[in-house]
Structures are given as C-alpha cells and as structure tokens.
Amino acid sequence: MRRQMGMSSPSIHVHDTPAEAAAAVAAECAALIRLRAAEGRSTVLGLATGSTPLPFYAELIRLHRDDGLSFAGVTTFNLDEYLGLEPGHPESYAAFMAKHLFDHVDLGSDRTHLPPGQVEEGDLERVCGEYERSIVEAGGIDFQILGIGRTGHIGFNEPGSPRDSRTRRIDLDPVTRQDAAPAFGGLEHVPTHAITMGCGTILAARRVVLMAWGEKKAEIVREALEEDVTDRVSASFLQEHGNAAFFLDAGAASALTPGAA
Ligand code: F6R
C-alpha cells in the first residue's frame, strides 16, 4: 500500500494497482464472514456490479477455492438492476452476478437478491418496499461494496438523490447511459431507468467500502471526499458515515490534495 491517509472518515487507502486494493477489501470481507460464522451468525453483503468490483469478486472466488472461504452463511443484496431488459439479458446485473460471483461460490440462489428488472408501473412501490423489508429482515447490511459513477452516483443514485432516499425507480443520467453504451452496443440499447437502493439504504450499512480505479475517476473521487456534502454527488454522503472507506489505485487517488484527508 502506498499510503493510508489520516484518521478521517472515510478512511482512504491507496494501493499501486486495483488488484492489490481489491485483495485488501476481499481480505476484510472474508475476515468478517469467518468471524461471524465462528460466532454462528450470518453475514449480509451489499454488492455492486460494473467493472470496478471485478478484481474483488475474482479474489473472493480464489479465497473460496484455495482458502476454504465458505459463503454458506452469507446473504447478498445487490444495489441495483436495469429496468426493462428481457430476463437473462447478458447486460442485466443478474447475469453479471451469476457470471462473476454466484456461479463460482457456495451461495444458494435463495440467499442472493437483486431488484427485479421487469416491473409493471403500478407494482413499483410494492416491489421496492419489499426489497427494503427483505434487507431489514435479513438483519441489515453488514458490509456494502460500492463503485462510483462519473456523476458521483453510488448505486444508481444520480445527482439530486436525497440523503434519505430508499429503493426506488431512477432515471439514469445521460453520462451514466453514455458510459454503459459500449457494453450495450450503442446508446440506443441502454435502458433509461433502473431500480436502485437509495442513499439512505446504503448509508444504513454498518460498513461501507467504495472502490475506484483509474484517472477517469480521480476528479469525482476528489469531489466526493474533499468538497462539501451535497446531493449533487451522492458519494459525498459517505463523509457522514462513521465507518466508510475508500480503496483507490494511484490513478483514482491522483487528484486528492496531499495531506488533506
Ligand atoms: C453498479 C453501480 C454503479 C457502479 C458505477 C461505477 O452496481 O451501482 O454505481 O458502481 O457506475 O461503474 P464502473 O465500476 O463500471 O466504473
């Protein structure tokens, strides 16, 4: 690790590479799962999709395969899902999670949860309320993984999302849709809406770890950590969470003011 900045919250951990940073996050997550299992307790993970958590999931799979890490007592809730994609669409977050984690570890399908991708308008409120209730019934989120969008979103909480927002439908920001366009083979194929946990849902997690890689995230990471808390950058709300951490590679940390944290 290159540097760990101050005693601030969020704590900031800068590593040379995404793989190193993700391994440190996976080690923390695995230790929590093992500690709670030893106490006969389950662990509730909040999970993200996108390119950022890929090295984290690869490391969890390695720990399962080579190091006996069991997910038998783990329950998961994903942050978000696109609305309107046909079931099984390769860019759906359900497909992503199966491919990059769920199919490779001992996590029963009854213990993995994502918001549904197909919901009638009139059913949205009920479905979103049920997602919130199922998190509470599972005991709340112990360890929440986040990436950050170039709009500053966590989950899909685009600019203007209130601090106390809960799971709901969201209009995806044009920047977010543009960033997703290559994966969908063109902007016209990118969904316009998603269901996302709210900022309030995320902030209720007992531990929150945001990862970011590369210079293209540097400026928004700086804004989230160094500017005032604002609903224009939903990741800035993490400044007010007592147990949040940013794990960054050198590129994502490159705009931070030295010594400011
Ligand atoms: C994904 C999610 C988003 C992403 C963010 C960064 O479930 O909620 O907030 O974490 O858009 O995406 P990547 O990692 O692809 O840069």
Image (cartoon, rainbow, N blue to C red):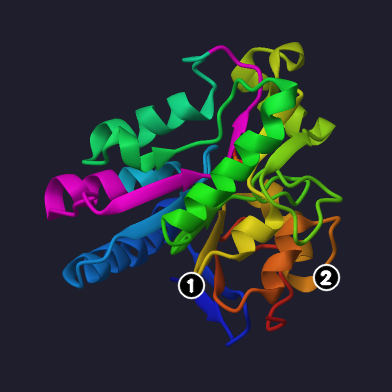
Q: In this view, does 16 lie above or below 83?
A: below
Quick one: quadrant of the C terminus? Answer: bottom right
Viewer-proximal residue among 18 and 141:
141
Q: Mark 2 points at which residue?
A: 227
Closer mark to the observer between disc 2 and disc 1: 2
Q: In this view, does 113 lie to the left or right of 260?
A: left
The residue shown at (61%, 58%) is 202
The residue shown at (74%, 54%) is 165
Q: Mark 1 points at which residue?
A: 2
Viewer-proximal residue among 27 and 3:
27
Q: In which quarter of the image is residue 121?
A: top right
Q: How far apart are marks 2 and 1 (CA)?
A: 23 Å
Q: What residue type is labelled 1?
A: Arg
Q: What stretch is highlighted in magenta?
A: 60-86
Q: In which quarter of the image is ligand 1?
A: top right
Q: Is residue 256 visible?
A: yes
Q: Is residue 251 above or below residue 203?
A: above
Q: Is residue 84 magenta?
A: yes
Across and down, in percent, residue 172 comes to 77, 33
Quick one: quadrant of the N terminus? Answer: bottom left
Q: How crowded is mark 2: few (under 14 residues within 10 Å), some or many (20 or more)?
A: few
Label 1 sits on a secondary structure element that is: loop
Q: Quadrant of residue 194?
A: top right
